[in-house]
């Protein structure tokens, strides 16, 4: 078991990666500073933390490409390949960097920006959020999108971003075709109309929504996290 996972080795990898990624961390801080300075110079009325939150979510989604784009590079990736750790320990450090550390940095920068907005313009933080919708956005949108990037960065040696976008396009096209096939081939529209007429559709619709949500959560992000691990295993064999 110690050959597969050791907290001490994983901590050492995290420590070395935190040092190696210091420039990337600095980029997030510079980005937040540039965003704040731009609004202070142009609007002078509001720093719009909600806009920064959206930009921050985008940064979280693409973070795997920013941090790990060169792990399989013939020259730049040598140090990563020679790390004295198992692939599972490397993946755990990879997961912590993307899912915990980077979102935490973005969240801290957002809080600082929100406090600056209160200090400069007396606009308090708005915590009136639809948490049910926010939960879906966080899981399916941010973590799901980031999980796609994590799988993509571990799956390809070259042109990671382009190949990942290509797979997303093919997946969306296949999903659209399958959805249209089910709707028109099995005449679901007529079934729903008839069900609505007899007041039996509401429970079925809610059951289908819950079932689909469970399946989607299993794929985004959990399934894609597993994909990223097995792809790391495959690439380093």
Image (cartoon, helix red, strand yellow):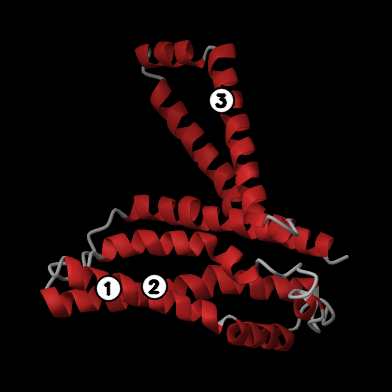
Image spot of residue 77 (x, y percent) = 75, 74
Task: Judge left or right: residue 166 versus residue 54.
Answer: right
Question: Is 16 positioned to the left or the right of 146 in the image?
Answer: right
Instruction: Find residue 161 and report its horizontal and vertical position in percent.
Output: 62, 54
Q: Which mark is residue 31?
A: 2
> In the displayed structure, would residue 46 be above or below residue 16?
above
Reply above or below: 86 against 152: below
Task: State the image quarter where residue 42 is shown.
Answer: bottom left
Q: Position of residue 67 (x, y in %)?
A: 60, 71
Q: Residue at x 52, y 58 (%)?
A: 143
| Left or right placement of residue 177 versus residue 33 in this view | right
* Image disc number at residue 179: 3
The Cα–Cα distance between marks 2 and 3, rounded to whole angstroms, is 40 Å
Residue at 79% of width from left, 72% of height from top?
A: 87
Q: Where, quadrant-wise, is the N terminus in this rendering?
A: bottom right
Work out whether mark 2 precedes mark 3 in sequence or the reverse, and give the earlier one: 2
Taking the image as drawn, is residue 139 in sight? yes
**Disc 1 residue crowd, few under 14, some 14–19, many 20+, Cα 10 Å:** some
Q: Which residue is mark 1?
A: 36
Which mark identifies residue 107? none
Circle 3: is it few (<14), some (14-19), or many (20+) Cα within 10 Å?
few
Between the C-alphas of marks 1 and 3, the distance is 44 Å
Mark 2, secondary structure of its residue: helix
Marks 1 and 2, Cα distance to the nearest angstrom?
9 Å
x, y percentage for residue 179?
Answer: 56, 25
Q: Secondary structure at mark 3?
A: helix
Quarter that holds the C terminus: bottom right
Number of numbered tags placed on the structure image: 3
Q: Work out which residue is located at the far right of the displayed protein and give it.
A: 237
């Amino acid at each position: 078991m110690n050959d597969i996972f050791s907290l001490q080795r994983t901590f050492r990898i995290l420590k070395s990666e935190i040092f190696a990624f210091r420039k990337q961390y600095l980029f997030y801080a510079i980005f937040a500073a540039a965003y704040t300075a731009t609004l202070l110079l142009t609007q002078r009325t509001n720093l719009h933390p909600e806009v920064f939150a959206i930009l921050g979510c985008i940064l979280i989604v693409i973070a795997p490409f920013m941090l790990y784009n060169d792990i399989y590079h013939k020259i730049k990736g040598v140090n990563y390949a020679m790390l004295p750790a198992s692939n599972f320990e490397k993946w755990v450090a990879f997961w912590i960097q993307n899912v915990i550390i980077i979102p935490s940095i973005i969240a801290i920068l957002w809080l600082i920006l929100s406090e600056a907005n209160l200090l400069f313009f007396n606009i308090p933080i708005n915590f009136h959020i639809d948490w049910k919708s926010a939960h879906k956005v966080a899981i399916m949108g941010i973590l799901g999108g980031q999980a796609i990037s994590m799988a993509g960065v571990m799956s390809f040696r070259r042109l990671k971003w382009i190949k990942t976008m290509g797979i997303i396009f093919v997946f969306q096209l296949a999903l659209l075709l399958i959805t249209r096939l089910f709707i028109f081939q099995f005449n679901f529209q007529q079934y729903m109309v008839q069900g609505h007429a007899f007041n039996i559709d509401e429970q079925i619709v809610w059951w289908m929504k819950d079932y689909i949500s469970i399946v989607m959560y299993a794929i985004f992000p959990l399934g894609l996290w597993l994909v990223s691990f097995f792809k790391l295993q495959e690439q380093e064999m």
